[in-house]
Image: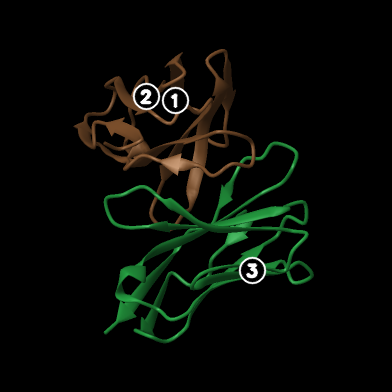
């Protein structure tokens, strides 16, 4: 049973518009969440994280929102750029062993 | 030069063969990880090591073994490869429990 779910395998967005990637989790013990970005033939690279004591974290064009009651987080990219085309993974951990549990990823395609 | 280097990048082998995937890092991190990624699934943890003398099983360790030869080197072995071990394998490192994990570019393994 997947504890971290990214229900959209792919998403297509016009360049310059907002991209919103979603992630749901089932384990209420998760207290730390991360987004990673992956280009083809490369490993995932860290993008942004959020602790459960916050509901928002912002870094430039990237903002992550956390809704603990809904067990839902989202990544907003504004404005979307061609270089943002990649697979985005959501991951979560709790403070018992800190192992990361990963979602299946969402492929984001930015259209010119 | 890459901070986390995986060799080989691609490998085709036959059922029953023993193979080793190697990972080396120049980041000076104590923690190292091996993951596999399958289509439609997130990364799943195979083994992790907190230092040279500390090796731990992850979510899917059956059929795999590891060796931490030095702080900088962490190898994954498939003692007798089987077709359902065909996957993309990633090595990662981190400096601490909640620190960012840095990934290698991956090894694409096919078991025929």
What colour do you see for chain B? brown
Q: Nearer the viewer, mark 3 or mark 1?
A: 3
The residue carrying mark 1 is: B64
Distance, label 2 to label 3, CA atoms, is: 36 Å
What's the residue at 37%, 19% (across, down)? Answer: B79
Q: CB atoms at circles 2 and 1 under 8 Å apart?
A: yes
Out of B60 and B45, give the one closest to the viewer: B45
The x and y percentages for residue A65 are: 65, 71
The answer to whether residue B82 of the structure is visible from this angle is yes
Rendered image: mark on residue A73: 3
Q: Is residue A42 above or below residue A87?
A: above
The x and y percentages for residue A50 are: 65, 59
Distance, label 2 to label 1, CA atoms, is: 5 Å
What colour do you see for chain A? green
What's the residue at 57%, 37% (across, down)? Answer: B59
What's the residue at 72%, 52% (across, down)? Answer: A30
Split into 4 quadrants, where in the image is the N terminus of chain B? top left
């Amino acid at each position: 049973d997947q504890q971290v779910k990214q229900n959209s395998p792919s998403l297509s967005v016009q360049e310059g518009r907002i991209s919103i990637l979603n992630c749901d989790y089932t384990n209420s013990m998760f207290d730390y969440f991360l987004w990673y970005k992956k280009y083809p033939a490369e490993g995932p690279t860290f993008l942004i994280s959020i602790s459960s004591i916050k509901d928002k974290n912002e870094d430039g064009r990237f903002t992550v929102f956390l809704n603990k009651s809904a067990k839902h987080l989202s990544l907003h990219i504004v404005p979307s750029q061609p270089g943002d085309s990649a697979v985005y993974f959501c991951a979560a951990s709790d403070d018992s062993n800190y192992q990361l549990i990963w979602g299946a990823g969402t492929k984001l395609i930015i259209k010119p | 030069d890459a901070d986390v280097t995986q060799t080989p990048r691609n490998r085709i082998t036959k059922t029953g063969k023993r193979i080793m995937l190697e990972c080396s890092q120049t980041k000076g991190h104590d923690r190292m990880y091996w993951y596999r990624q399958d289509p439609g699934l997130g990364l799943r943890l195979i083994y992790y090591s907190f230092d040279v003398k500390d090796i731990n099983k992850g979510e899917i360790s059956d059929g795999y073994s590891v060796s931490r030869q030095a702080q900088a080197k962490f190898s994954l072995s498939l003692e007798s490869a089987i077709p359902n071990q065909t996957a993309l394998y990633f090595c990662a490192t981190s400096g601490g429990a909640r620190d960012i994990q840095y990934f290698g570019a991956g090894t694409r393994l096919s078991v025929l």
